[in-house]
Structure formats: C-alpha cells, structure tokens
Image: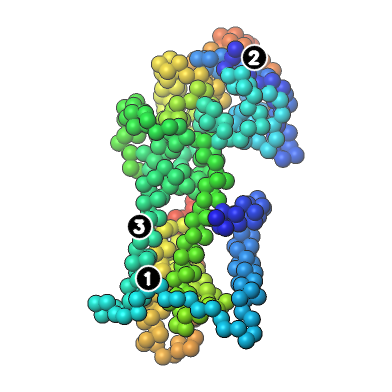
C-alpha cells in the first residue's frame, strides 16, 4: 500500500521530467529520510533498542544452519509466487504489457498508472519481507538504522550483475554476489575488514564490461 | 446517426497546436480514409480520437457519446481500437501474449474462441505463437497488430499508416485483409494512409487534410476523380 502511495505522490511527478536518474535520486533520498525518521522515533538515549525476534529456527537441520535454510525457502517461495503472478495471471500479463509498451497498453484498455502503482506496491511488499528477514537474521538481532545500508550495496551489485530489467538476473546475480562474498571473506585475507570492496568492484566491472548485466535486454533503437 | 463524428476538434502537443478544427464523419460499416502530406495532422487526428493528446477540444462523438476528454483506456473500452504508426506491438512479449493483451479489457468468455479464429485467419501468427513479437518481420508485425486490435472486438478500428515500411506486395496483402475484415465483420474503419490509390480501393469515403484542416471530403469515387487529389496523391 505504502509503495503504491509513494508511486502516486512522489515517483509519478518525477517521472514526468523524463529522466530516470531523478527517480533513483528520489528513492535514495526517501531511504535516508525514512531511516533518519526511524532513528528519531525508536532510538532514544538510555532506551534499549527494540529487538527483532528470530523468524527461523536456530538449530541445524541436515547440517545446514536453520536461518540459512529458512532464507533459501523464503527466496524460493517468493520467486514462485512472483513468477506465477507475472506469467500465469491476467494482471501479470497487463503488468508486463505496460512494462513493454505503455502507449499500446493504454490502447488495449489497461490503465498504465494503476499498473505502475501495483508494481511499486509489489516492490515495497518484497522489500518489507526482505527487511524483516534481514533484521531477524542480523547477528545481534537488534534494530539498527544502518541495517540495510550494506544490504543495499549488495542488492545493487546483484541487480547490476543480473541486469536491471531481468527477474531471473536478480536471483542469479544475488546468488553470485553472495557466494563470491563468502568465498573472498573466507580465503582472501587481504580483503579482511574491507569486504565491501567486492560488491563495489563488481558493480564497476559489470558497468564497464556489460552495462546491461548478464540477462538484461540490450536496448536497440530502430530508426 | 454516424458511428464517429468529429466536430471542430482541435489539439496538439504542449504549446504547439496541430489541429485547427477537424470536422468529419464515419458511417457504421464503412471504411473511411484520411489523405494528406507529412505534417498535415493525420496521426494527430487519430491520437485526438483516442485521447492521446495533451489537450483536445471540440466534440468526438462515438455512437452519440462525446469521448473528448476521456482517458485512452476508457476510449479503448468504449470500443475503439487503434493500430498506431509503427504498429505498437509489445516487442518482448510473445505473439500469443500480444493477442491475449488485445482481449484483456473484455470479459473472459470467448477469448479462446477468438484466439483460434484469428490464428486461423493469420496462419503465420499461429506458426510464430511463442516467438517474441519484436523478432518478426514488419509485415508479420502489422498483421499481429491488426489481429490484436480485433481481439478486443472493437466497433471502430483506427489504422495509422499500415503500409509504413512495408514492401509494396505486403502492403497490398495488408489492405486486402483489411477489406476482407470490413466486408465479413462489417467493421467500421478509419485509415490514415500515404498510399492513396490502395486506400481508396477499399474506402467508401475520403478526406484530405492540409495543415490541420479538412480541405476536401467526399465519397471515395469523388476523391479519386478530383483533379487536385489525383495530382497530389495519386500521381496522374
């Protein structure tokens, strides 16, 4: 709901300027603003920060840590639901129609604005799930306003790697970034303490070598 | 009552006004054609009917109801299908998805039957059912755009330069198919076309547009015999 509202009130006027970079700046601004607001509301001196209860079992199942297994299942479920929604329902078809060609979508009777609101709503819902999952698996289990800052960097690296307009790319990119990160922390001592070099390096490399990502569409303008 | 009647329609893009008062009628069941030079306002006239301009004034009477000021999706749902210039296919979606999108605004029953019907009418589309629409040839995409419009069961079909970028033989094929659909379905069409000779063959009525105004209007025969039209658009 909040996501849909944000699309309507903030994103749409900015989209009219025709520059997609403006939208990125606005969302970044909102991220920082809402974070600061949360700190103002929930973190007071002398007050213990609220703790997030663990969502997943802490014991090991089949030799895998409970939270790892839980996150993997959550990811699989999200992918399945999203795929079914986009590929198997009329609403999903309409959403993809708007993404593909907004003018033609309007000409077959779809309201592009409503679909964009729905898209932002979906994105916000997925974001909320991701935020809850991150908070509940964070090492100290405490709310922290800097919680998502690292996640944001990793997510951006994953999206850049997979291609910004590809769902499959997002998942594959995320897995690659995650595995690469674990491996470097484990085996490359030189990066100890500066692990964030990896995602930034990946972003840079992808943008240099393959700006559309692994699965992204190459946009070709026919004249 | 005419199916479509424009009265004093003006409009344009932002501060630039293109249409300077368009008056025209299209009767139920006929094909009407709009001829005119580049920049005369042909495409803009079709966009005005579909509510795709920033500001449109005047009356756009569709079946007696004034659609001026309505949104594009509302107008589509009222029964006006528009095949835009450049065909407007959903390039990265499959042919099948394109056709299903054409029927997305109407109730479900009948969609499958219509799908089968248009695949039968355009066998090339059936062959390429699961192929991305953008990977097909221009002629195939034009057929797809027409079939997609028909999936919505429109009462009026607007076509913007269906011959654009097509080889002469394929253009002829497209117009033959349009003529067939008009005769068999009794579907009313308003066609904007540079290829005046072909368009007048299937049309009952024609208009000539110059700098945002209708300067000549009449039956297709009258237009084909008009000296000015012949010199300017038919080349003899």
Eye-nearest disc, 2 or 1: 1
Residue highlighted by disc 1: A71
Image spot of residue A205 (x, y percent): 47, 72
Instruction: Please name the residue shown 37% across and 65% down the image.
Output: A75
Residue highlighted by disc 2: B217
Instruction: Please name the residue shown 37% across and 29% down the image.
Output: B110
Looking at the picture, tell me which residue is in the foreground, B94 or A11.
A11
Instruction: Please name the residue shown 71% across and 29% down the image.
Output: B57
Q: Earlier in the sequence, mark 1 or mark 3?
A: 1
Above or below residue B229? Residue B93 is: below
The quarter of the displayed image where residue A176 is located:
bottom left
Determine the secondary structure under disc 1. Answer: helix
**What subunit carries mark 2?**
B
Disc 2 + disc 1, Cβ < 8 Å: no
Instruction: Please name the residue shown 47% across and 83% down the image.
Output: A140
Residue highlighted by disc 3: A80
Determine the secondary structure under disc 2. Answer: strand
Residue B195 visible (yes or no):
no
Image spot of residue A128 (x, y percent): 50, 65
Most distant residue in the bottom direction: A189
Residue A128 visible (yes or no):
yes
């Amino acid at each position: 709901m909040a996501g849909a509202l944000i699309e309507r009130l903030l994103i749409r006027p900015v989209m009219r300027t025709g520059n997609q970079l403006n939208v990125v700046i606005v969302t970044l601004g909102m991220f920082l603003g809402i974070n600061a607001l949360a700190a103002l509301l929930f973190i007071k001196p002398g007050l213990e920060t609220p703790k997030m209860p663990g969502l997943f079992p802490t014991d090991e199942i089949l030799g895998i840590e409970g939270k790892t297994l839980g996150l993997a299942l959550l990811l699989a479920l999200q992918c399945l639901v999203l795929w079914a929604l986009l590929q198997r329902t009329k609403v999903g078809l309409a959403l993809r129609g708007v993404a593909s060609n907004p003018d033609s979508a309007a000409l077959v009777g779809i309201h592009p604005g409503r679909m964009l609101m729905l898209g932002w709503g979906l994105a916000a819902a997925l974001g909320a799930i991701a935020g809850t999952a991150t908070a509940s698996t964070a090492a100290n289990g405490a709310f922290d306003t800097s919680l998502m800052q690292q996640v944001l960097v990793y997510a951006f690296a994953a999206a850049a790697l997979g291609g910004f307009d590809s769902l499959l790319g997002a998942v594959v990119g995320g897995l690659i970034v995650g595995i690469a990160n674990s491996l470097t922390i484990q085996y490359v001592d030189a990066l100890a303490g500066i692990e964030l070099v990896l995602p930034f390096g990946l972003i840079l490399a992808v943008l240099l070598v393959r700006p559309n990502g692994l699965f992204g569409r190459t946009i070709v303008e026919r004249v | 009552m005419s199916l479509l009647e424009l009265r004093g329609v003006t409009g344009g893009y932002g501060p630039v006004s293109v249409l300077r008062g368009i008056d025209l009628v299209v009767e139920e069941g006929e094909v009407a054609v709009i001829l005119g030079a580049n920049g005369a306002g042909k495409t803009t006239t079709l966009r005005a009917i579909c509510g795709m301009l920033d500001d449109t004034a005047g009356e756009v009477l569709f079946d007696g109801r004034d659609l001026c000021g309505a949104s594009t999706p509302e107008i589509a749902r009222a029964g006006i299908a528009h095949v835009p210039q450049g065909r407007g296919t959903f390039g990265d979606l499959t042919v099948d998805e394109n056709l299903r999108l054409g029927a997305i605004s109407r109730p479900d029953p009948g969609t499958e039957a219509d799908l089968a019907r248009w695949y039968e009418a355009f066998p090339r589309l059936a062959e390429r059912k699961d192929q991305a629409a953008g990977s097909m040839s221009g002629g195939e995409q034009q057929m797809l755009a027409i079939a997609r419009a028909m999936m919505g069961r429109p009462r009026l079909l607007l076509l913007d330069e269906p011959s654009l970028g097509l080889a002469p033989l394929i253009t002829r094929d497209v117009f033959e198919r349009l003529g067939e659909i008009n005769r068999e379905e009794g579907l009313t069409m308003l066609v904007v076309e540079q290829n005046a000779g072909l368009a007048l063959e299937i049309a009952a009525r024609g208009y000539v547009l110059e700098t945002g105004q209708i300067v000549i209007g009449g039956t297709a025969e009258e237009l084909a015999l008009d000296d000015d039209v012949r010199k300017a658009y038919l080349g003899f």
